[in-house]
């Protein structure tokens, strides 16, 4: 299991990569591709959409390993690369 420092460094690298991709959106065609990604993944947060776009701009569907098997009746190809997203943090704001 990776240490907390390793996870923190990995997250920082992933978010930096996403930020670099977003900065490239000054080109009209790139911006259109980004808007298509926004439309496909409207149920995700803006941060996660940025992460999805940075890792695979052509992504059409994002799901967990088990969800592919149970909800979509699909198998994940051996050696397939995953798309990492940030887990939602749900907090109760009032006691």
Image (spheres, rainbow, N blue to C red):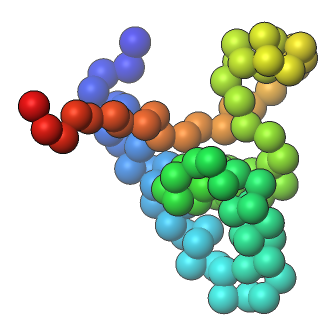
Q: Is 42 on the left or on the right of 47, as rendered? A: right
Residue 75, x across and y down, in percent: 87, 14
Q: Is 41 on the left or on the right of 87, as rendered? A: right
Residue shown at the point (56%, 78%) measured from the top left: 23
Residue 39, x across and y down, in percent: 75, 62
Give whichever of 40, 25 is nearer the camera. 40
Viewport quadrant of the N terminus: top left
Residue shown at the point (59%, 37%) measured from the top left: 84
Viewport quadrant of the C terminus: top left
In this view, 82 is above or below 35: above
Q: Can residue 78 be seen in this view?
A: no
Residue shown at the point (71%, 30%) measured from the top left: 63
Q: Is 33 on the left or on the right of 92, as rendered? A: right
Tell me where residue 31 sits by quadrant.
bottom right
Residue 33, x across and y down, in percent: 80, 70
Q: Is residue 49 visible?
A: yes
Q: Residue furthest front?
A: 95
Residue 74, x across and y down, in percent: 89, 17
Residue shown at the point (61%, 68%) measured from the top left: 21
Give whichever of 94, 91 is nearer the camera. 94
Give whichever of 53, 5 is nearer the camera. 53
In this view, 25 is above or below 52: below
Disc count in the image? 0
Tell me where residue 5 sits by quadrant.
top left
């Amino acid at each position: 299991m990776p240490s907390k420092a390793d996870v923190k460094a990995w997250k920082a690298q992933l978010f930096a990569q996403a930020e670099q991709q977003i900065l490239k959106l000054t080109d009209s065609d790139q911006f259109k591709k980004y808007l298509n990604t926004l439309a496909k993944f409207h149920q995700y947060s803006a941060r996660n959409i940025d992460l999805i776009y940075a890792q695979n701009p052509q992504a059409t569907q994002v799901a967990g390993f088990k969800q592919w098997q149970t909800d979509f009746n699909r198998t994940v190809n051996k050696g397939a690369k995953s798309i990492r997203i940030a887990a939602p943090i749900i907090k109760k704001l009032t006691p």
